[in-house]
Image (cartoon, rainbow, N blue to C red):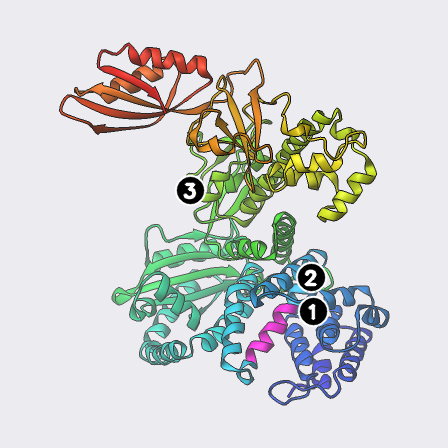
């Protein structure tokens, strides 16, 4: 069992005596705070924070991180609060402890919701201090090492959470050693039988291949020595979860994966990395298309290395990774290899890893601010945590890392949220391309924007990054709210006008009472509810009418001037698909709960039973003059003589007068005649009349009616 004295002896190599004394003081404070508490295994509780501090000491983390590790469960499991820790150990330590602590005092409907809220809180703390996540990962690692004391169902839940969230975070921060151990421990808890069988197979295969691996290692090492290159060659073990994941995702047999021999060459400089690459390519033939240069273009987590695959002797496949010592340290420890709090400074490689991590955390913070709730946020984060990256160039040569399958819309939001919100089209390698086209590494993408553009709901069907998804949803929600408020204002103003008043004339006391009764904070909240159709403007107007009008005054039932609409009101005004109203038609509005205003033609049979109900309908008119910017869908029913090429003739005739054909269906009525349904877009009734006149000019058309 680790002791505080043993930890102190380890810390002597990189911390000052004063800093070690502060770490010891934090330990004794935690020991007293957790006095009488025991873990599921029966050990004193303080052994857990001490073990977490030992893990961080192995990463050479600063004294404040170690102090926070000692105290990380104090707020959650004892009577001591944030203020108490801040007074004893300072604000920085208290902030880290608070960021790691769970939200234990809030009630959640589901365990998943509680986990999502906890993770969201931790991300906010990470944005302030990146050490929060390092302490949390060390905490999770020790919990996984001692998971056997838990009930089997709890073991599976914690293991699943580790595989879904914490191991990918460690990977994203470049902390491969910690990631590998978390994955293998979680794999053994979640799939114990599968882990046992794979481990047994690995031990068997390793024993059979030991001589071959040593021969290959010696041949590579001898070649480097002959060339005068300073490089240390070692075999690289595949861990259990990596083998299982490749078998599952790539649908490969165990033998196919274990037939690949993996080696790592560690050297002193970047120049020697490339010279060693040339030497091994001279020794064994490289497999075409299997070389990756992560030194020139590092991974998103700061990982740098040269990767190549070779054809070895006796038909073997050899994977070789070539990197410097600094790169190897960052590949193992990731962000933990760099900290602004270290005494001895950090390498450029480690600094790059740290800066990328900070950028990623800032991206998480932006996603959190735009997400509707914690569950939506954590789903977006999960998508970001499993990236198989592609590397895309901006027109100025800047490199952006995106998950595989990312589209130009994802790229636009990665550049800047405003670029994404205003993009209309793109060029990929100087050619115009659809916004939904998946991107490939090495492409140069140019985003074309316009100030009037805005995100499209259809983009949610193909974007893959969490930032793009949350930004689009955030914009659409804001747009819907603004449009709902505007429509609600116009609807309420329409009915208030029947009392000789306007929205601006509403008595403040009556409004305050209504907002209190309806549980709204502001007038905009009330107007939004009206615009969405959840509350009748007619009823609200009666509550807010001037005192001069008596309770028996029912003038709103006799509706006055119709509400004018422009035809481009947006998301909260929809046009009924049953009758397809267009400018020039006599129209009526149906106030539908949750959808806002649905516009019908006055003769539409579906609106007939509601036509005289002032609580559900409102008479509308088109604002004049109507411009030709907005197109409206209309349906036509045609009766035509059957002949070759009739569908093409109808489509051409409609296009000749500026109509856009959306859909055309035909069904045979008898041997000579057939019926055709056309769905097209026009600007107004005048435009529709021109379309019908053009279609009637075809000799094969015998009858046309509007649907």
From the image, state whether disc 3 or disc 2 is nearer to you: 3
Residue segment shown in magenta: 136-145
From the image, state whether disc 1 or disc 2 is nearer to you: 1
For the point 63% across and 61% down, the residue is 117
Mark 2, other Cα within 10 Å: few <14 / some 14–19 / many ≥20: some
The x and y percentages for residue 96 are 73, 65
Look at the image and say whether residue 138 sits in the magenta stretch: yes
Is 513 on the left or on the right of 51, as rendered? right
For the point 68% across and 57% down, the residue is 124
Q: Which dot marks residue 438?
A: 3
Look at the image and say whether residue 99 sits in the magenta stretch: no
Residue farthest toward the left in the current orientation of the protein = 671
Quote the CA–CA distance across marks 3 and 2. Answer: 37 Å
SS for dot 1: loop
First of labels 3, 2 by sequence position: 2
Is 518 on the left or on the right of 188, as rendered? right
The x and y percentages for residue 325 are 56, 63
SS for dot 3: loop
For the point 72% across and 64% down, the residue is 342
Residue farthest toward the right in the current orientation of the protein = 87
Q: Which dot marks residue 101?
A: 1
The quadrant of the rendering that contains the N terminus is bottom right
SS for dot 2: loop
């Amino acid at each position: 069992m680790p002791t505080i004295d043993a930890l102190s002896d380890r810390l002597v190599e990189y911390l000052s005596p004063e800093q070690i004394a502060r770490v010891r003081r934090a330990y004794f404070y935690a020991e007293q705070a957790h006095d009488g508490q025991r873990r599921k295994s029966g050990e004193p509780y303080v052994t857990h924070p001490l073990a977490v501090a030992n893990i961080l000491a192995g990463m050479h983390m600063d004294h404040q991180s170690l102090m926070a590790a000692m105290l990380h469960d104090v707020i959650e499991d004892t009577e001591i609060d944030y203020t108490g820790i801040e007074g004893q150990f300072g604000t920085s330590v208290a902030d880290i402890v608070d960021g790691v602590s769970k939200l234990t005092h809030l009630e959640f409907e589901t365990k998943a919701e509680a986990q999502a809220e906890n993770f969201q809180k931790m991300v906010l703390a990470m944005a302030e201090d990146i050490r929060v996540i390092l302490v949390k990962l060390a905490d999770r690692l020790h919990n996984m090492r001692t998971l056997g004391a838990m009930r089997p169902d709890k073991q599976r839940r914690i293991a699943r959470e580790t595989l879904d969230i914490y191991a990918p975070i460690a990977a994203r921060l470049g902390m491969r050693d910690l990631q590998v151990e978390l994955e293998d421990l979680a794999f053994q808890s979640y799939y114990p039988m599968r882990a046992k069988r794979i481990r047994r197979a690995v031990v068997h295969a390793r024993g059979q291949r030991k001589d071959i691996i040593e021969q290959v290692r010696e041949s590579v090492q001898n070649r480097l020595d002959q060339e005068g290159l300073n490089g240390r060659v070692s075999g690289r073990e595949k861990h259990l979860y990596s083998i299982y994941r490749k078998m599952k995702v790539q649908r490969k047999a165990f033998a196919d994966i274990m037939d690949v021999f993996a080696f790592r060459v560690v050297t002193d400089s970047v120049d020697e990395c490339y010279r060693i690459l040339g030497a091994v390519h001279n020794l064994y033939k490289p497999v075409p298309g299997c070389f990756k240069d992560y030194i020139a273009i590092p991974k998103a987590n700061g990982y740098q290395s040269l990767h190549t695959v070779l054809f070895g002797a006796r038909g073997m496949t050899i994977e070789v990774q070539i990197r410097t010592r600094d790169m190897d340290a960052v590949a193992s420890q990731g962000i933990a290899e760099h900290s602004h709090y270290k005494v001895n400074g950090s390498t450029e490689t480690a600094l790059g890893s740290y800066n990328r991590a900070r950028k990623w955390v800032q991206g998480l913070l932006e996603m959190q601010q735009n997400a509707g709730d914690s569950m939506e946020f954590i789903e977006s984060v999960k998508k970001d945590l499993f990236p198989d990256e592609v590397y895309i160039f901006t027109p100025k040569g800047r490199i952006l890392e995106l998950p595989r399958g990312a589209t130009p819309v994802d790229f636009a939001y990665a550049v800047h949220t405003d670029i994404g919100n205003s993009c209309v089209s793109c060029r990929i390698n100087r050619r115009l391309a659809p916004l939904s086209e998946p991107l490939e590494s090495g492409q140069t993408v140019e985003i074309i924007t316009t100030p009037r553009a805005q995100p499209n709901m259809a983009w949610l069907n193909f974007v893959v990054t969490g930032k793009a998804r949350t930004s689009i949803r955030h914009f659409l929600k804001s747009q819907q709210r603004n449009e709902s408020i505007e429509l609600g204002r116009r609807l309420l103003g329409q009915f208030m006008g029947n009392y000789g008043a306007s929205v601006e004339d509403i008595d403040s006391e009556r409004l305050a009472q209504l907002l209190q009764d309806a549980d709204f904070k502001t007038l905009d909240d009330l107007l939004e509810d009206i615009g969405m159709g959840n509350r009748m403007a007619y009823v609200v107007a009666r509550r807010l009418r001037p005192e001069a009008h008596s309770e028996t005054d029912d003038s709103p039932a006799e509706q006055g001037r119709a509400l004018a609409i422009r035809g481009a009101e947006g998301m909260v005004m929809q046009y009924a698909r049953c009758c397809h109203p267009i400018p020039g038609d006599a129209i009526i509005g149906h106030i539908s709960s949750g959808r806002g205003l649905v516009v019908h033609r006055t003769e539409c049979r579906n609106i007939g039973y509601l036509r005289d109900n002032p609580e559900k309908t409102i008479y509308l008119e088109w604002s004049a003059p109507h411009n030709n910017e907005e197109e409206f869908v209309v349906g036509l029913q045609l009766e035509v003589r059957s002949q070759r090429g009739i569908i093409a003739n109808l489509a051409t005739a409609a296009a000749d007068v500026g109509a856009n054909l959306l859909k055309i269906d035909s069904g045979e009525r008898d041997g000579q005649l057939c019926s055709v349904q056309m769905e097209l877009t026009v600007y107004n009734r005048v435009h529709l009349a021109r379309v019908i006149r053009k279609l009637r000019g075809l000799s094969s058309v015998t009858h046309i009616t509007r649907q």
